[in-house]
Amino acid sequence: MVLRAPSLARWRFQASVLAPVVLSLLVTAATVLAFILWSTSDLDEQSRLRELKLAEHILDEQRQTIPHDQQSVTIWDDAIERAKLNFDPEWVDNNLGSWMYEFFGHDRTFVLNDENQPIFAQSQGYPVNLGIYDADERVYRRLVEQLRERIAAGAVDAYISGDSTEYPQAVEIATVADSPAIVSIAPIITDSGRLLQPRGSEYLLVSVVYLNVAFAERLAEEYLLTGASFTRQPDRKAANTVLPIMSSTGRIVGFFEWKPDNPGQRLLARTGPVLAGGFVFALALVSLLLYRLWHSSSALEAGRLAAQHQAHHDALTGLANRVRFEEVLGRALIHQRPHDHGVALLMLDLDRFKQVNDTLGHQSGDDLIRAVGQRLKALMGPHDALARLGGDEFGVIHVARGGLADHLELSERIIEAISTPFEIFGGEAFVGVSIGIVAIGDGDIDRREILRKADIALYEAKSSGRNRAVVYEETMDELLQNRHMIEAELREALRRDDQLTVAFQPLYGRAANAVTGAEALVRWTHPSLGKVSPVHFVPVAESTGLIEAVGDLVLRRACELGARHPGRTIAVNISPAQLRNPKFAERLFDLLIDTGMAPTDLELEITESILLDDEQVAAASLRTFRGAGIRIALDDFGTGYSSLNYLKRYPVDCIKIDRSFVSQLEEGSVSVAIVQAMVTLAHALSIEVTAEGVETEEQKRILAQLGCNTFQGFLFSAPVPTGEIEAIFARSELEARVA
């Protein structure tokens, strides 16, 4: 009893102290829960209203896009000649029917004569019986009559003469073949003003785009509307957001519905476990206060183990850190090399991590590193060791019976896993991974040497294109030394004025010997190495930060030439490092002022890798340059995976068709069709086309027929010094005056 009384008193004291705390926690938890439920409900409602406005915008945009698609073929002399004056069914099928289906996704296309009767019909890319038009003739009739009235009132004549910028068309949402659809009708008129037609005799092009599953899926992917679909009747059982699709007369044609985003519910799903965890943690803390005397020794032991774990593990990912990894590597070099196994060191470095970190924030960067660690951990075998070595760098010690083949197979699986998008804060983050591989042999015992070789292989993986694995070879040491030598000599060359020069390769227009300008190209003549190819020293300059100094030299020489020859376009290649520099634009404009060159005579050539790596910075810089009148050209067009997307999103004046396509041009070659598609696309977007690498008369002839605006290549001239390019300019001016 004597021993129990103090114990009971102690319990009563603790209860009197903790009871208010527990009650406060319960009241606080209830208040927070009520607030979260109200906030998430309001958040979902606001999201629903935003999505409804977005859906209305999408439909309005499609009403404008489809008529705009038609203009690529209806304002065309060839269409008048082949569809009206000399009807050519095959030409009409290829250029009006199949083109509208394959390139723009128009499901049905009809050509109507001046009596509003169909003379051609296609559905889903194939010619069909003209009777298909009659099945929905009542739908088309009202639009045809509206358009004919506008034509009779002089709308076409006003557009052709330039008195009006509005191209006459008739657009409506209607039911075609028992399906909601957008119907657009446009007259086929001249683009040159050469083939004028009596008013009212114009043939008409009818396009039908069904609002069906495929169309909805395309909109869902583009605008991130989950489960979007078009229906005749909304699904009342599904909790979808529904937007009625109405014609201009106010009649409901169908419904556009999608699964609502409900960010509030997602937030609730994420915060609920956190709140529950916090409450549980509070209860555990109270319990800990009650039993701390009995568990003090356990707490001390847990602290010791935690400190030991932290000393050998990365706090962010929970993986082994560099210290622990080097210890395991050292043991592997001594003990873990049985003859029937292969041991390799893999050094991993994420590609484009800096862009994700800078764009989404450091917290997102930390989340991405954790997610990468989890994916890598899932790929490891029972005898493998994985560590985070710091930043976005990881290390793997891989043990496999198959030797090098197994190491490469693991590397491919790692690249594939990391290339899959990461879900970060409700969005997607894209990174890649470069891998350097060193196979550890029986004689390898120097840990630092193995790490050095792995770093060299990793450098090769990054410099050769990234997102790939490279196995270390002894020759890489020599290549690395060669790079260091080139870097040192290039630094010396930049301090002098007698090694680095700028050559100019002339640009020719379509007219005979019409020189429109030149492209500036850096050249390096070393006193002992001789002529050093840009293929060798430009990548070194880019990887060492010297490219900005080299680029400034080329820009200055180009601007000096442009100032002496106004009206000539001088093109200069711009590296990603230059465009990333926030002071580049200021430096460029100062250079234009110093030399007196007109901004409209300067053309900056960029590659899509610049847009891919630094999308926001690139877009802002390009807008600044375009605003000043500087031309922007997209170099090596057609070699990247998303060049078409960039033409729509970025201000581009010119595309340069890569020499890999030009070199294969010959009659009947598939490259002819590819280049034709590029030229047609560019001209449809009011973008000029330059073909580089032209070396034969046949290539020039084909490119001219395809509509290329400018030519460049050894057929005309190799890159020449400043004096020779000025002589070429002078001869061109003299020939132009004589002509």
Image (cartoon, helix red, strand yellow):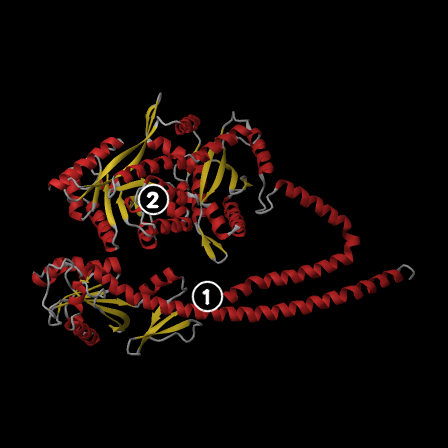
Taking the spot 74% from the left edge, 47% from the top edge, the residue there is: 300
Residue lying at the far top in this picture: please name it.
528
Mark linked to residue 297: none
- On the picture, is 284 further left or further right than 169? right
Residue lying at the far right in this picture: please name it.
2
Q: Quadrant of residue 186?
A: bottom left
- On the picture, is 292 further left or further right than 361? right
- Is residue 475 in view? yes
Taking the spot 39% from the left edge, 39% from the top edge, the residue there is: 465
x and y, in percent, of residue 305 in the image: 69, 44
Query: The N terminus appears in which quarter of the rendering?
Result: bottom right
x and y, in percent, of residue 505 in the image: 25, 36
- Quick one: 440 or 100, which is closer to the camera? 100
Residue type highlighted by circle 1: Asp
Residue beneath disc 1: 261
Residue type highlighted by circle 2: Ile
Mark linked to residue 606: 2
- Quick one: 695 or 119, which is closer to the camera? 695
